[in-house]
Image (cartoon, rainbow, N blue to C red):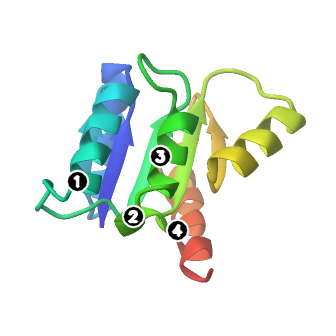
């Protein structure tokens, strides 16, 4: 699987990319929401000929576009509109904020930072990916 990873904190981006590789996947890291949108534009235009992401894991608050805005953009990009999307946040969201973000952006899950330990995070992300595959 190819994982689109959008995270502005370089340490977290590197950590998540490394975990992705350890779990047998290929990371596609982006340092901002804007860089992820630029990539998605190339997908929409047909200019991107390499593999497409099968999963997206993104921070919510990033420079340029936020993760929920990138998620919405993914949902409007036909070749990848179906992929599972998980957002990460260090901020506390109310249940209403979570529900609204999930509904309006089409995300499948929102997880809090600090991230769960290695195997717990793997189980959580595998569960989201499996759940999405059934829909």
* Residue at disc 4, secondary structure: helix
Q: Give the labeled residue for mark 4.
A: 129
Between residue 76 and residue 114, name the one nearer to us.
76
Q: Would you call the spot at circle 3 few (<14 residues within 10 Å), some (14-19), or many (20 or more)?
A: some
N-terminal label among 2 and 1: 1
Q: Are marks 1 and 4 in contact (CB under 8 Å)?
A: no
- Judged by depth in the image, the label closer to the viewer, 3 or 1, is 1
Q: Is residue 18 visible?
A: no
N-terminal label among 1 and 4: 1
Give the residue at the far top of this rendering: 63
Q: Would you call the spot at circle 1 few (<14 residues within 10 Å), some (14-19), or many (20 or more)?
A: few
Q: Is residue 3 above or below residue 111?
A: below
Q: Give the labeled residue for mark 1.
A: 45
Q: Give the labeled residue for mark 2.
A: 80
- Judged by depth in the image, the label closer to the viewer, 3 or 4, is 3
Q: Give the labeled residue for mark 3.
A: 73
Q: Are marks 3 and 4 in contact (CB under 8 Å)?
A: no
């Amino acid at each position: 699987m190819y994982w689109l990873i959008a995270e502005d904190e370089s340490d977290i981006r590197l950590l998540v990319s490394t975990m992705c590789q350890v779990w047998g996947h290929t990371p596609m890291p982006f340092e901002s929401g804007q860089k992820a949108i630029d990539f998605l534009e190339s997908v929409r235009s047909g200019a991107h000929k390499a593999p497409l992401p099968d999963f997206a894991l993104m921070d919510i608050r990033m420079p340029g576009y936020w993760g929920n805005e990138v998620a919405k953009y993914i949902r409007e990009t036909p070749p990848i509109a179906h992929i599972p999307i998980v957002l990460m946040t260090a901020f506390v969201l109310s249940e209403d904020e979570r529900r609204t973000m999930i509904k309006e952006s089409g995300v499948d899950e929102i997880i809090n930072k600090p991230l769960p330990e290695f195997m717990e995070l793997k189980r959580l992300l595998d569960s989201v990916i499996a759940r999405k595959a059934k829909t």
